[in-house]
Image (cartoon, helix red, strand yellow):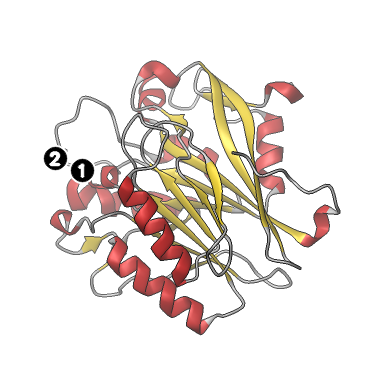
Amino acid sequence: MLLCMPSCSYGRYLEILAAGDVTPAWRMLEEPVTAPLFSLAARQRISQAHVFLWNCEASGPATYSKPNQYLFHADSALLADLAFPNAVAITANNHVFDGYQEGAANLLSILNYLGIRHNGLFYKESGYKPQLLTQPPLPVVYLLTGSPMSQRGSGPDIFTLGYAFLLEEVRALRIQEPGAYIIVYGHDGDEYASAPSRRQVYWAKQLAFAGADVVLFCHNHRYGEIVILEDTPRRTLVAWSLGNFLFGGNLKWKNHPDVRLLSILIDTDTGEKYAEWIYGMTRNWSFSLPENE
């Protein structure tokens, strides 16, 4: 179910654009720098949003890599196209550790070099910090990210946040910032199933009752339903699956007729949330909006 967008003035709304998996490896091998990842209209549309979230399901280069039939590596040649001023890369997923800790550390170095904000990986010594997404005069919006279980086996120094720890972070942040909007992005779901898993349903409700306004999931390569959890304190909006975006783990998504972004509006007067899909497509790995081009 999509939640119809309001017809009133756009000025009182915060827009969050959420994208699923970004894995540029096959494009990196075929055409490293010959064409942009976005058409002009697509880039302009993404830039209009207050926040653009995308799941960086890729490892940085590493000496040793885990065996995998797909390609989950990236370098700065293509990730530079994702350096939107409003963008935040989600790094709380299993494939950032395909090159073990070395690959995860190199991914962070690439993102930092390109000036891309990111959230999901943290060092044991420094701990995890929620990501502040907005600046005054906009309302305060935070992002927290995690996965069902912390990727502690891929350390020993770099981790992701497991759901139990993520829940505590949401609770603490809601107490600290009672008026803030909290977005949670989790890497979870049954692969190739658009319906949510029991684990997703359970944790979405837990996070909602802890104070999350929006809960997003990505992992299963399908686009899922968007719902409002009516009985939760902040009527939390949940997207069960954001699907694939610029997915180059295999060749299927090189030229794809259905590639989507999710537009979420938060009414800053009432706290109500609305959502709709923005439909696009890929041609030779480049995302475009056919209705505009």
One can see residue 255 in this view = yes
Is 287 situated above or below 176?
A: above
Could you say where residue 80 lies in the image, as x and y percent from the top left? 50, 41
| Residue holding disc 2 | 64
* Relative depth, front residue between 250 and 259: 259
Q: Do the residues bearing badges 2 and 1 touch, measured as CB atoms within 8 Å?
A: yes
Q: Find the distance from the CA under tag 2 to the CA under tag 1.
A: 6 Å
Which residue sits at x=36%, y=24%?
26
Could you say where residue 138 lies in the image, as x and y percent from the top left? 71, 68
- Look at label 1 and name its amino acid: Gly
Is 80 situated above or below 170?
A: above
- Mark 2 or mark 1, which has the lower sequence index? 2
* Relative depth, front residue between 179 and 50: 179
- Look at label 2 and name its amino acid: Tyr
Secondary structure of the residue carrying numbered label 1: loop
Which residue sits at x=41%, y=24%?
27
| Residue holding disc 1 | 99
Quadrant of the frame with the C terminus: top right
Instruction: Describe residue 187's horizontal placement relative to residue 141 as left or right.
Output: left
Could you say where residue 85 lies in the image, as x and y percent from the top left? 61, 53
Quadrant of the frame with the N terminus: top right
- Mark drawn on residue 168: none
Instruction: Describe residue 19's horizontal placement relative to residue 39 as left or right.
Output: left
Is 257 situated above or below 267?
A: above
Is 219 situated above or below 53?
A: above
* Relative depth, front residue between 167 and 90: 167
* Relative depth, front residue between 6 and 181: 6
